[in-house]
């Protein structure tokens, strides 16, 4: 039995995008187990939440972290030492200082405890950086150099690692949520259907409440104009607001609260249900004819279902991911004004058949790039399992393992 840990994933996050990474990574590990015959037990290190976990199975257990546990580094290290290898996905895009120093510092702290546990580490496909702070860069470089395997999910992240001074091999893959399985029933529509994901976070101006992401247009006004334009289309499509962060306890981030407030202003729109799992959100989105949104993983759910999609980006991670696959429909809300954004989304709807063809081609590129990561991870799993089975201490005994990892740099 090989014990695989997963760090900076989530089993119960209100952000279904982070959950999509978890469910998808577990599916990848199960596929590797079937292909190699290696029995894998998965431990997800997570924070407790009110939502019921959306991962399960006899092969999955969850170990909860909290403030008290975090204050005891020896206890955290002992938790990590129960694993044979640990996958770290950095919550997809949080290994960066774009979200503020507090989040990055917490991440760096846990990463160093992970390395002090002397377990092999795989940095799963994620957005790395930007690291704008002079203080963050040396820590980031050191942590990345220590990993057994490093994978990014876009070309820009790979370039950032090179600029950071990381010279080791790096796999440029794609987002693991491309392989998220849909689950549950999807609705049927009698008219053309448009899904619009409205970010509750952006509606409130970001975490600071003061246009944190420096969008050119007033996001809330743009959304209202866009809904009005979509409802006025001559073919009278069904316009559906699709929340992807559903967080009653954090109304400043809650897409559902934003959607319900907009529905009060626009009674002709429909609000999608409060999804229990990332897979149920994907099944719903897959039923639509066209999709636009500001939550990247809501857009990935459409993209991976061959639905024509126009991502509305608040950061470079959107263009980094979709552009790397040759899909150029992303709108940069930091650059485009209100009128341009509304016109571009409406034009995307009119051209949805052509966009859907582009999506199908680009999705296959993404799946192919992701396969390189899956194959490399399978080799790591096989190597660690073999060393464990034969009693080779290079990846088992603390001191030897640390040297073995450093020799890979």
Image (spheres, rainbow, N blue to C red):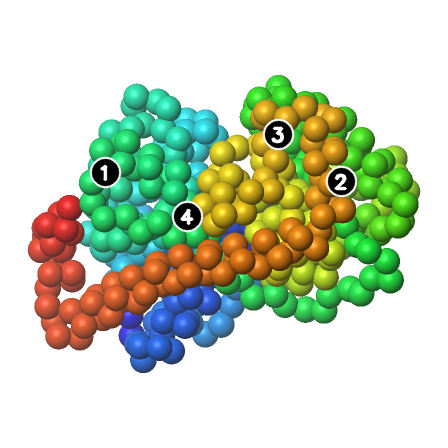
Dot 3 corresponds to which residue?
A: 333
Q: Disc 1 or 4, which lies upstream in sequence?
A: 4
Q: Secondary structure at mark 3?
A: loop
The image position of residue 51, as x and y in percent, is 61, 54
Depth check, front residue: 314 or 204: 314
Q: Disc 1 or 3, which lies upstream in sequence?
A: 1
Label 3 neighbour load within 10 Å: few <14, some 14-19, many 20+: many
Query: Are circles 1 and 3 on residues that touch, CB within 8 Å?
Result: no
Q: Disc 2 or 1, which lies upstream in sequence?
A: 1
Q: Quadrant of residue 228?
A: top right
Dot 4 corresponds to which residue?
A: 153
Tell me: residue 146, above or below residue 120. above
The image position of residue 21, as x and y in percent, is 49, 54
Tell me: residue 306, above or below residue 221. below
Q: Secondary structure at mark 1?
A: loop
Q: Nearer the viewer, mark 4 or mark 2?
A: 2
Q: Residue at x 25, y 66 (%)?
A: 379
The circle drawn on residue 331 is none
The circle drawn on residue 346 is 2
Depth check, front residue: 310 or 9: 310
Depth check, front residue: 81 or 245: 245
In this view of the protein, can residue 106 be seen by the observer?
Answer: no
Q: Quadrant of residue 192?
A: bottom right
């Amino acid at each position: 039995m090989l014990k695989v840990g997963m760090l900076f994933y989530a089993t119960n996050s209100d952000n279904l995008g982070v959950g999509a990474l978890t469910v998808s990574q577990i599916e990848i590990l199960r596929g590797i187990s079937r292909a190699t015959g290696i029995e894998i037990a998965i431990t997800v290190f997570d924070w407790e939440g009110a939502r019921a976990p959306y991962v399960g199975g006899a092969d999955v257990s969850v170990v909860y972290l909290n403030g008290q546990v975090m204050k005891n580094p020896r206890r955290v290290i002992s938790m990590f030492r129960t694993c044979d290898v640990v996958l770290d996905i950095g919550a997809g895009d949080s290994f960066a200082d774009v979200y503020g120093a507090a989040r990055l510092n917490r991440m760096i702290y846990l990463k160093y405890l992970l390395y002090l546990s002397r377990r092999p580490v795989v940095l799963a496909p994620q957005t790395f950086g930007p690291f704008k702070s002079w203080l963050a860069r040396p820590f980031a470089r050191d942590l990345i150099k220590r990993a057994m395997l490093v994978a990014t999910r876009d070309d820009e992240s790979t370039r950032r690692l090179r600029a950071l001074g990381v010279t080791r091999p790096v796999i440029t893959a794609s987002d693991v949520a491309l392989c998220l399985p849909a689950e549950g029933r999807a609705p049927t529509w009698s008219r053309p259907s448009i899904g619009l994901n409205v970010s509750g976070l952006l509606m409130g101006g970001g975490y600071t409440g003061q246009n944190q992401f420096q969008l050119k247009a007033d996001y809330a006004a743009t959304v209202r104009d866009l809904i009005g334009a979509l409802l006025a289309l001559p073919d009278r499509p069904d316009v559906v607001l699709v929340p992807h962060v559903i967080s009653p306890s954090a109304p400043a981030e809650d897409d559902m609260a934003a959607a319900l407030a907009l529905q009060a202003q626009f009674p002709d729109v429909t609000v999608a249900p409060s999804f229990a799992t990332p897979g149920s959100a994907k099944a719903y989105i897959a039923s639509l004819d066209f999709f636009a949104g500001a939550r990247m993983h809501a857009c990935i759910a459409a993209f991976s279902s061959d639905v024509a999609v126009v991502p509305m980006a608040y950061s470079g991670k959107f263009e980094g991911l979709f552009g790397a696959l040759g899909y150029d429909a992303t709108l940069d809300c930091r650059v485009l004004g209100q009128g341009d954004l509304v016109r571009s989304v409406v034009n995307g709807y009119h051209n949805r058949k052509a966009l859907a063809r582009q999506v199908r081609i680009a999705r296959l590129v993404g799946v192919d790039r992701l396969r390189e990561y899956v194959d490399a991870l399978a080799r790591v799993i096989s190597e660690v399992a073999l060393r464990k089975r034969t009693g080779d201490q290079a990846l088992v005994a603390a001191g030897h393992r640390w040297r073995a990892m450093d020799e890979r740099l």
